[in-house]
Amino acid sequence: MTYKTDLPVMLPVTPREAEPFLRLSLWHAIPIAAVCIVGPSLAFAADGIAILSPLAVLANWAPLLLKGFVFNLVISISAMGLGTAAGAMLGLGQISPNRAMRGSSWFVTQFFRNAPWLVLLFFAMFLLPFEISILGLKIPFPDWFKAILGLSLPVMANVSEIVRGAVNSLPSGQWEAAESLAYTRRQTLWLIILPQCVKRMLPPWMNLYAILTMATVLASIVGVSEVMTLTGRALSAEGGRPELLAPFYGFVLLLFFAYCYPIARFTVRLEKKFSVIT
């Protein structure tokens, strides 16, 4: 009787390559810009029409579009700051020992976290008054401020979940050790728990900010003069030339890519640096 000695051997697993998105760099923006901006300009120049090329028109409007993009950043930073402050308190409310506080905080978090951002923006835009009077003093509510309030609501809910998840991810021994040292719950939170949560909260917080920055273009739907609104007005002022669509919107795309992609890369680095091995 013969026995087969050639047993199957499992070959070593080939390491998986990084995702294509993670291999991108800022230098990849050059061919993107060439395709979206320069390409239509060259095609238009080949027609021989004696008017400004799309690239020349874009160069004339670029300073105004950059100012609009800066306003997008102002909206994103303001909404992120307001939403972070409110979301931190809401997240601490979710871990409160008080049952009523914990339940109400959970409901508010889930309501705004699962609501469409555009719907919240419309609610803030049309339900808030144009101005309020306090002791005879009229305080205006401009559209850009309403947009900040509307965008801060989903940010608040997501930050609340980030805080709750970070606190709950810490070992229970941290709480027990603080209790053995006669720390109060407030002292335990501010001196022991929250300082350790910063590393865990920072990567998702930065990712949320990048998402918020890209969502600021929703403010154009309600008439806020940001980069998308100004782009539409610039195209209308140029007589609705269809060959301007790709260069102008490609320029806006390039602005957001150049700002948000470094944030995404830095977030990946922080995730690797602060990763917790279990």
Image: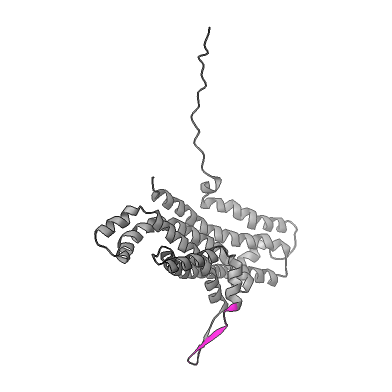
Residue 273 picture location, percent across and down? 39, 49
Locate the C terminus and report the quarter of the image it occupies. Answer: top left
Q: Of 222 and 193, which appears nearest the observer? A: 193
Q: Is residue 65 above or below residue 166?
A: below
Instruction: Evaluate whether residue 61 shows in this view.
Output: no
Left or right, 177 with respect to 269, comes to: left
Picture coordinates of residue 105, whole percent (x, y): 47, 67
| Residue in view at x 47 percent, y 92 percent | 135
Q: Is residue 118 left or right of residue 182?
A: right
Q: Give whichever of 205, 66 is nearer the camera.
A: 205
Residue 123 painted magenta: no
Residue 169: quadrant of the picture: bottom left
Region of the chain picked out in magenta, as a range: 127-138
Image vertical order of residue 154 relative to residue 15, above or below:
below
Q: Residue furthest left?
A: 181
- Please name the residue shown 50% across and 27% down the image: 11
Comparing 97 with 257, the one in front is 97
